[in-house]
Image (spheres, helix red, strand yellow):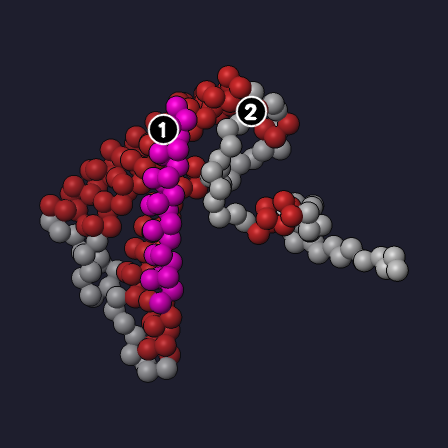
Amino acid sequence: MEQYIRFADKLSAWFGKVFAWCVMVMALGVGYEVFVRYVLNAPTVWAFDLTYMMYGTMFMIAGAYTLSRDGHVRGDFVYRLWKPATQAKVELVLYFFFFFPGVLALIFAGWKYAGRSWRYLEVSTMSPANIPIYQFKSVIIAAGILLTIQGIAQVFRCILTIQRGAWPEREADVEELETVLQKEGAGALKHGSEAIDIVTPKVDRS
């Protein structure tokens, strides 16, 4: 199980970090559109299509990576009070009753939409550029497959936690600044998500 967890985490991380570059493509496209529209008075016909395709691709593909890092939003005002084994038992049930049915529905629906789109080589109706979007529809299937692979790894994590009483350690990865500051004991961000700078005066002992 641990070997599969490492495999799934690395796979999700690779796809997540590669497709994170979509945000740069999106930013460059939007920046160029703003320049030519308001400075040169010559707006493009493709920037809007580029924007939603890049954002949608990044959002969908990064879902498995976010899941592997336990980064999805969680209403944990009760969950965090439970023991790890209890948390794992609840999560295990939720994965089978909600997560996997939802992801499988995503794959089947995506297969239907993408297949139909590929058959007639669908183009965007949002602009006169007629940009192909059938390849964009295929992202739905890819995202569902990645989520399924990562979901199995999360189930294995739950099983190991139930057996051992503690969540398995995750591999080192990029972290939020808030987490880094807390680990370094910087005295900041101790009261939730709001940034609170606490300056500790140095005492001169000379």
106 above or below 27? above
CB atoms of marks 2 and 1 within 8 Å? no
Q: Name the side, left or right, on which 181 lies relative to 121.
A: right
Q: Name the side, left or right, on which 177 lies relative to 9.
A: right
Mark 2: which amino acid?
Ala
Image location of residue 50, percent across then percent down: 29, 61
Q: Name the side, left or right, on which 145 lies relative to 95.
A: left
**Type of secondary structure dominating the magenta stretch:** helix
Q: Which element type, helix, strand or loop, lies under badge 1?
A: helix
Image location of residue 148, percent across then percent down: 33, 32
The quadrant in which residue 33 appears is bottom left
Q: Quadrant of the N terminus?
A: top left
Residue depicted at x 39% and y 37%: 9
Neighbourhood count class around disc 1 (C-alpha, 10 Å): few under 14, some 14–19, many 20 upward: some
Q: Which residue is mark 2?
A: 166
Mark 1: which amino acid?
Tyr
Name the one closer to the observer, 64 or 79: 64
- Is 25 magenta? The answer is yes
Residue depicted at x 35% and y 34%: 7
Name the one closer to the observer, 190 or 38: 190
Outermost residue toward the right?
206
Residue depicted at x 20% and y 66%: 128
For the record, the magenta segment spans: 1-28
Residue depicted at x 43% and y 42%: 66
Q: CA distance from mark 2 to mark 1?
A: 18 Å
Q: Which residue is mark 1?
A: 4
Query: Is residue 149 at least partly visible in the picture?
Result: yes
